[in-house]
Amino acid sequence: MVAAGATATGAWRDHTVKVDATGLAADSWYWYRFRLGDAISPVGRTRTTASPGSTVDRLRMGVVSCSNWQAGHFTAYRHLAATDDLDLVVHLGDYLYEYAPGEFQARDVVIRPHDPPVEMTTLEHYRRRHAQYKSDPDLRALHALVPFVITWDDHESANDAWSGGAENHTEPDEGVWSERRAASQQAYAEWMPVRYEPGGRLYRRFTFGSLAELSMLDLRTYRSQQAAHPLDPAISDPARTITGAEQLRWLRSGLLTANAQWKLIGNPVMIAPVRFPATLSTAELHALSQLTGPLEGVPYNVDQWDGYTADRAELFGALRDNGVTDTVFLTGDIHSAWAADLPADPLGYPLNGNSVGAELVCASVTSDNLDDLLRVPPRTASLAAETAIRVANPHIKHVELDSHGFSVLEVSPRQVRMDWFQLADRTDPESAARLAVSFAVLAGTQRVRRVSGTPLP
Ligand SMILES: [Fe+2]
């Protein structure tokens, strides 16, 4: 035993306990447990990061997002727990959803109803919903096995949240936004494994020796309101922001001065520019717009970095002008699998636009995606949409709009590789998972390329 201590909890923090264990050795596994009287908790395991500058040959992490209780079972977490040699799990947001039963589930079927059975708007609602998600046995087992590095997206508070409100927030019926957001932040601080206090800073950086740094972003707290329309000139207005000025400065300077080789970014919404082609049918465009935000037949998803192009141009320009290499965005939110190069100039790509990095996007653990929204069998309507998107966006090397599951990212000095695992059936608690596809970014290339897969874990 290397450390022990006592701590207090109570109704003031929803009877949760959080201990920031200090004085631990770097790059080591630790086990922990809690006692209350004669009761002893299950044993949990965690891992400390390697010291900056130390040699790390390999890092393996689960990458997940969009785990909607009502849309299925968290079988993806069970398969992740069975994956060999994971050092950590990165959850990119939409860890839980705010909706009432009947508002957002598996197509039209509530697989497991939310508790409380209302849209969460108050502190009591947010606390009960967090408690419900933490009752899932697969999620609990994964938390007990490896450390989670998390950030939030919108549904931890309300759909399409921004600094002054949310699409799914109506004043005055649902109270004042600042109070609702504060309630969501308090429950998050109580229940989630993160050094965060309400009103504080969630974005932060982890270092894994000389191999990698991981910058986790908060793209909800400081962002300007989403543009009303995809053709709204506001999308390129430099006065609007998705990061906030301070976070963008922090990210930019971190990427430019990083001592580690790989610059990984935990990025809640897609940064690759995506133009949706006019060849898609009205139904496909309508379903894509439900997946991605307002669309109306034109190129932009205004809830992603595509709706805040000045911030993206500043970031990509800084990477290009300073010759920064080996930058990889790890992304969630969009309930589909993508791999893309990141051209500073997408219109000229690949003729005159060099890529400044790569983006790897994991599918949803359970949340509805394109075939679900279209109410069609998988691998039917989506095939045409995927082909059309790739043709209209030559920097996008992979897009798959139907599957649910998880990704495993392996980082080595030679390459960063993501393996996408698909669930056979998100509504089946015993669902199998299979390796679908793998893409890698070779060091120094700033390009994704398809590589052969590996056997099932
Ligand atoms: Fe989501």
Image (cartoon, rainbow, N blue to C red):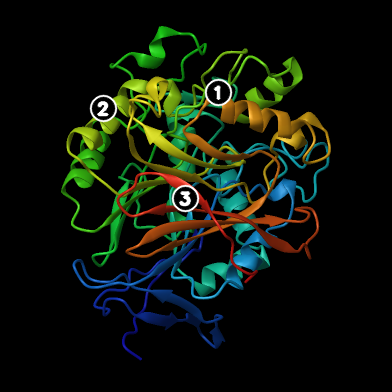
x 34%, y 57%: residue: 195
Residue 314's tag is: 2
Amino acid tagged 3: Tyr
The percent position of residue 193, horizontal first and vertical second, equals: 44, 61
> Does the rendering let one see residue 314?
yes
Tell me: residue 294, above or below residue 99.
above
Choose between 48 and 178: the one closer to the eye: 48
x 46%, y 36%: residue: 181
Mark 3 sits near ligand 1, with its Cβ under 8 Å away: no
**According to the image, label 3 marks what residue?**
188
Q: Reading the chain from its start, which is encountered first: label 1 or label 2?
A: 2
Q: Quadrant of residue 276?
A: top right
The percent position of residue 202, horizontal first and vertical second, equals: 34, 47
Instruction: Assign the N terminus to one quadrant of the image.
Output: bottom left
The percent position of residue 313, horizontal first and vertical second, equals: 30, 25
Amino acid tagged 1: Ala
Mark 2 sits near ligand 1, with its Cβ under 8 Å away: no
Residue 392's tag is: 1
Q: Reading the chain from its start, which is encountered first: label 3 or label 1?
A: 3
Amino acid tagged 2: Glu
Q: In the displayed structure, does residue 246 sit left or right of residue 455?
A: left
> Does the rendering let one see residue 12?
no
User: Going by the picture, which residue comes out furthest to the front?
Assistant: 351
The percent position of residue 238, horizontal first and vertical second, equals: 28, 17
Mark nearer the viewer, 3 or 1: 1
Instruction: Assign the C terminus to one quadrant of the image.
Output: bottom right
The image quadrant in which ligand 1 is located: top right
Query: How many discs appear?
Result: 3
